[in-house]
Image (cartoon, helix red, strand yellow):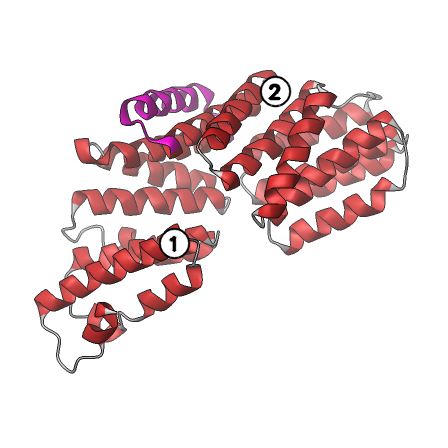
Amino acid sequence: VVAAQVSSADAVGARVLQALSELIIRAADLNLAVGNTARALEVLARFTPEFRGAIDVDVRLALHLAEARVAAHRERWNDVVQILAVTEENESEPMDADLLGEALMRLGHARLEAGEVEAASRTLALAVAQLSGEDTRLLHGMGSCYLAIALSRLGRIDEARTRGMDAMTGAVCVGELRLRWSSLVAMAEVAESVGDFTGALTRWSDAMGVAREHTMPVELCRAAVRSAAAAFEAGWESRAAVFAEEAIHVGRKHRQEAVVSLASAIQGALAVAAHPDPGFVKGMVRGVESLEAMERPAEAAMALRMLASVHVALGDVPAAIRTLGRAQPLAVASGQLPLAARLMRTAERLAEGATDTRGV
């Protein structure tokens, strides 16, 4: 209300502009906290371009960060990159060190999610180095988690493991649940990148425990579907079925359509492995198409990997090889390079006469 009154005034001084920006950022973050992204966008729009031209670089960067948090909440990662690219363009300008570090961290995360893994690793390394103060330990830890994932996807496993362990240690020191969850996710990704699905399952299920204990439903269903996928690869069908069911149950309640589609694909693969029935194929194909329509290439690639296992169970190896060939470029596009390599190797094994492709 105050922001609306101030922004409608005829003349606004510099000090009032600073206060106005703080009110708007606070209002946007409060709206995000209750899941109202539309209202958060409306609040940010009150700070017109005319006002932005009259504020200093730190206040402008803080507003960019608020806009980036809203875009990230909506998983519009390319929008986040576009919003925060100004950080690199104006890096020579004097800026608040902590704000710059946060901007680089969020930019690197967005690039990672957008599949720009090499660029993400460089940006995140800069961010982690920048966020070295006592007041930025949480952001430093989150940056280390994202950097560990980026490095693991680039095959730099030792560096990734070191960053991930640093993040886990930091999570204990900071005592922040989101950092604890993210550090477990990072270590799960590191394990998966070297084909250690048993280790990955341990980390994913630990992440589920953190999310369940502290009422983090979105994080819970995302960790559950990755637990299901890891259990499937490790050959633990019963555990995979339990995890997939929980991912679907929680995902539906919280509108996580991509999670539900991938978990359904895992359920289909498990069902056909137990009782071969070609009736599951059409539903799984529709699920893949829905993931592609949502622009979720990583999940689509994982779902296609499940569909390939169904073709194998039904005795149609050529269809399985074609399905894996369709999945591989999707994995590359999403930056999931270890997954892409695994899909290629799985297709090669099938061509060589293998009948079990799990755990490659």
Q: CA distance from mark 2 to mark 1?
A: 35 Å
Q: Residue 61: x, y in percent?
A: 24, 56
- State whether residue 11 is above or below residue 169: below
**Does the magenta run of residues contain 160?**
yes
The relative height of residue 13 versus residue 308 in the rendered view (above or below) is below
Q: Is residue 325 left or right of residue 145?
A: right
Percent across and percent down for residue 137 are 25, 31
Q: In terms of secondary structure, what is the magenta stretch mainly?
A: helix
The residue at the point 84 percent across, 38 percent down is 319
2 vs 1, front mark = 1
Is residue 357 placed above or below 65 in the rendered structure?
above
* Residue ID for mark 1: 32
How many residues crowd around disc 2 within 10 Å: few (fewer than 14), some, or many (20 or more)? many
Packing grade of label 1 (10 A; few <14, some 14-19, many >=20) is: many
Answer with mark 2 or mark 1, whichever residue precedes in sequence. 1
Looking at numbered disc 1 in the image, what kind of residue is underneath it? Leu
**Quadrant of the drawing holding the N terminus:** bottom left
Q: Quadrant of residue 276?
A: top right
Q: Is residue 280 visible?
A: yes
Q: Which residue is mark 2?
A: 197
Identify the residue at image location x=55%, y=32%.
Answer: 223
- Point out residue 317 in the picture as x, y percentages from the top left corner: 86, 31
Is 314 positioned to the left or the right of 227 in the image? right
Quarter that holds the C terminus: top right
Q: Secondary structure at mark 2?
A: helix
Q: Is residue 328 visible?
A: no
Circles 2 and 1, Cβ within 8 Å, touching? The answer is no
Who is closer to the viewer here, 139 or 315?
Answer: 139
In the rendered structure, which segment of residues is drawn in magenta? 153-177
Tell me the kind of residue under disc 2: Phe
Percent position of residue 27, x then y? 29, 59
SS for dot 1: helix
